[in-house]
């Protein structure tokens, strides 16, 4: 790291790439989209490093991943695309190559996450996967802390309802 | 003139600690279960008196076997021990001496004293809050008749420990930690024990130490660190220390098992960690695990702090503790307060 | 009296679990939890879900995810060209370039720290063996350990 506390792009990819991928995977629910999301995010990181001021690096990175994710969500809403034909070379989510310890329960929780509307999914993932404090989540998503709290709580209650069948 | 230096690298202390504790724990253990109502109540009173005498009055020597698992394979080591004047000595050539208050380690240039008793300022929680202790039978250990005491987690009924006390002297002869499926995950016990005799001579003077190596007890930790009062299932913060090389040690106990959490500022350099560890996923995070006879050490880094957890706790307790450690994934340092204050603790 | 009557919104339960409340607010929540079985039930459910998400395993990224993007020239446009540029491809430079990337990953930063695991084990077991009170005192069992380097 340089003396002013700003990491190099290499360092970000090397030391924080897995963290970014973890957030991306829980937001998107599958390996391919997570990989695309991380790569796009890293490109934005490279551009953004010039103006980055040292602080919570993981908070900043999570913010970028979130913004790229939401941009893509908005883009898809504006221009619906057709599903691509199935590609036998793609690694399917849930296969051993994609996940470590891909248990049934993990799959259920991930699938339940995917059913949440994006703003609730982002709030829950940034809290429980990226482990950011509410203040950071508010900065990452551009909403007040009170809204963050409400989205996290409602997101968790929705998740619980979605998992009801699996757990009862 | 006593000079300060870093603690020695060789870990012979582990054996000293274990065996001292085993011997001295006779008193504590029987007091703990004798205090409560239970099948062993009346007999407990006699054992308490006898145990107190045993610790102060008996000289013994023998061989202790230590058992543990590493990467799924069972391992055993044997250590000769010797105590003829109240000072427990380990090994064929004496390198470690301890009387439960001070531990002395012999190094190339003299003796180093580690951890004088005054650094243990905190009180552990009573094991009765979490565990039930009951006499369950009698067996032979090292050829001697011994009473078996079991410690079960109150909440789940899970068996966690088995302790064996010598019927003749009340010395603790063996301690077993029981894991899932009833497997003995760790054990230390006498395999041979010469018939303990009353100590004839007064304790010889301890060697004069030429070095001191012990961390400094503190009541505050810097803003980069986290010091939760409790972690996991019933592990309470007992003491906190500043480490000689920087960083802090937080010492937790649930009354039966103990756990130290070490925190050190700076991104973790995984490539420089010692060999012999194994990468694992615990509670959703990637960690490096070192299994040793006495304890497991779990190392990970998050948000520019390097964490280690050194513990003999059963795996479910460890998972719960890691999950509860707020800094295990880290929260941003932005806006954090200047210090965490560790107030005096109290147990309900 | 329910939480609503007291003016406490239900989402304070999540903030409570996440450690986002002041001591004063925590005390208010705990009073309410003691008085309200329905709130306790909600807390239990939310705690379970929170733990389930936090317990999700860390997913393993595909091997070449970072390698690829690190080889990207600066100034690549995002958007519609994204998929083509970041799709699977082969570099003509191949092995040497990949090796250079791997080596770059392995060099440690001078500012990193390495916990001294043997010393930490020593510190813990020594502290654990100190007897201070008649409460059960059982230090970790053990034996000389050696760490390679």
Image: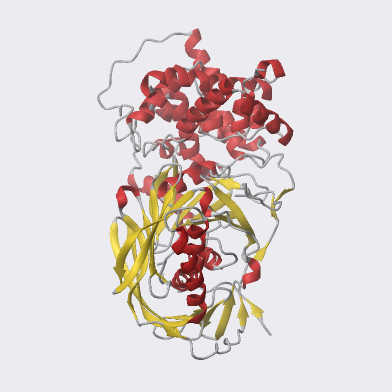
Measured along the vertical axis of the image, is residue A82 above or below residue A16?
above
Residue B122 lies left or right of residue B307; in this view the side is: right
In the depicted view, which residue is nearer to us: A6 or C144?
Answer: C144
Mark yes or no: residue A38 visible.
no
User: Residue drawn at (60%, 52%), measured in percent from left and top?
Assistant: B237
In the depicted view, which residue is nearer to us: A60 or A101?
Answer: A101
Q: Position of residue A150 (x, y in %)?
A: 62, 20
Residue extending farthest front: B42
User: Residue drawn at (40%, 70%), measured in percent from left and top?
Assistant: C143
Measured along the vertical axis of the image, is residue C127 above or below residue B85?
above
Which quadrant holds the N terminus of chain C?
A: top right
Residue extending farthest left: A88
Say which quarter of the image contains residue B281: top left
Mark yes or no: residue B168 visible.
yes
In the depicted view, which residue is nearer to us: B90 or B164?
Answer: B164
Measured along the vertical axis of the image, is residue B314 above or below residue B324?
below
Q: Position of residue B336 (x, y in %)?
A: 71, 42
Which quadrant holds the C terminus of chain C?
A: bottom left
Say which quarter of the image contains residue C135: bottom right
Total labels: the figure holds: 0
Residue B142 lies left or right of residue A22; in this view the side is: left
User: Residue drawn at (52%, 18%), measured in percent from left and top?
Assistant: A118
Instruction: Identify the coloring.
Output: secondary structure
In the depicted view, which residue is nearer to us: A40 or C77?
Answer: A40
Q: Position of residue B5 (x, y in %)?
A: 61, 75
Q: Position of residue C55 (x, y in %)?
A: 45, 36
């Amino acid at each position: 790291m340089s003396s002013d506390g700003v990491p190099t792009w290499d360092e970000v990819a090397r030391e924080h790439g897995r963290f970014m991928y973890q957030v991306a995977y829980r937001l998107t629910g599958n390996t391919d989209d997570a990989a695309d999301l991380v790569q796009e995010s890293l490109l934005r990181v490279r551009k953004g490093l010039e103006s980055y001021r040292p602080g919570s690096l993981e908070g900043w990175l999570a913010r970028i991943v979130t913004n790229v994710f939401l941009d893509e969500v908005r883009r898809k809403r504006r221009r619906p695309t057709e599903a691509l034909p199935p590609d036998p070379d793609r690694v399917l989510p849930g296969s051993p190559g994609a996940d470590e310890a891909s248990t049934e329960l993990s799959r259920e929780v991930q699938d339940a996450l995917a059913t949440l509307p994006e703003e609730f999914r982002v709030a829950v993932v940034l809290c429980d996967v990226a482990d950011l404090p509410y203040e950071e989540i508010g900065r990452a998503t551009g909403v007040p802390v009170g809204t963050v709290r409400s989205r996290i709580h409602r997101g968790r209650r929705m998740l619980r309802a979605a998992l009801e069948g699996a757990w009862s | 003139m006593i000079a300060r230096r870093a603690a020695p690298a060789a870990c012979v202390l582990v054996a000293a600690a274990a065996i001292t504790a085993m011997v001295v724990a006779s008193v504590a253990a029987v007091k703990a279960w004798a205090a409560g109502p239970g099948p062993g109540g009346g007999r407990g009173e006699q054992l308490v008196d006898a145990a107190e005498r045993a610790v102060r009055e008996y000289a013994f020597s023998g061989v202790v076997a230590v058992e543990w698992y590493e990467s799924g394979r069972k391992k055993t080591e044997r250590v000769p021990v010797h105590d003829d004047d109240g000072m427990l000595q380990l090994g064929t050539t004496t390198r470690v001496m301890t009387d439960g208050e001070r531990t002395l380690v012999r190094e190339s240039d003299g003796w180093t004293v580690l951890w004088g008793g005054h650094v243990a300022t905190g009180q552990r929680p009573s094991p009765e809050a979490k565990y039930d202790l009951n006499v369950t039978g009698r067996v032979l250990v090292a050829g001697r008749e011994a009473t078996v005491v079991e410690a079960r987690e109150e909440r789940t009924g899970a068996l966690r420990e088995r302790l064996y006390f010598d019927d003749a002297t009340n010395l603790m002869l063996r301690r077993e930690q029981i894991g899932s499926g009833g497997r003995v995950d760790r054990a230390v016990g006498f395999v041979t024990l010469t018939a303990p005799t009353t100590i004839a001579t007064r304790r010889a003077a301890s060697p004069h130490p030429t070095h001191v190596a012990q961390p400094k007890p503190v009541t505050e930790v810097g803003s980069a660190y986290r010091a939760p009062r409790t972690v996991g299932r019933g592990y309470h913060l007992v003491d906190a220390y500043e480490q000689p090389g920087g960083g802090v040690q937080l010492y937790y106990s649930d009354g039966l098992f103990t756990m130290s959490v070490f925190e050190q500022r700076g991104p973790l350099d995984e490539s420089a960690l010692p060999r012999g560890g194994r990468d694992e996923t615990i509670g959703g995070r990637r960690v490096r695990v070192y299994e040793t006879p006495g304890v497991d050490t779990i190392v990970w880094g998050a948000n520019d702090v390097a964490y280690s957890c050194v513990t003999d706790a059963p795996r479910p307790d460890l998972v719960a503790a890691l999950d509860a450690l707020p800094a295990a994934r880290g929260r941003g340092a932005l806006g954090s307060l200047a210090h965490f204050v560790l107030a005096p603790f109290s147990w309900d | 009296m329910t939480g609503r009557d007291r003016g406490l919104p239900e989402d304070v339960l999540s903030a409570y679990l996440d450690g986002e409340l002041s001591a004063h607010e925590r005390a208010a929540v705990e009073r309410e939890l003691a008085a309200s079985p329905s709130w306790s039930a909600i807390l239990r459910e939310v705690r379970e879900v929170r733990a389930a998400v936090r317990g999700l395993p860390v997913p393993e990224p595909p091997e070449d995810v970072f390698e690829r993007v690190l080889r990207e020239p600066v100034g690549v446009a995002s958007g519609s060209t994204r998929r083509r540029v970041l799709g699977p491809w082969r570099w003509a430079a191949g092995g040497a370039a990949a090796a250079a990337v791997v080596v770059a990953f392995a060099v440690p930063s001078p500012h990193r720290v390495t916990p001294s695991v043997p010393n930490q084990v020593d510190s813990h077991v020594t502290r654990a063996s100190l007897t201070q009170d008649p409460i059960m005192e059982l230090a970790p069992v053990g034996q000389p350990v050696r760490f390679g380097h």
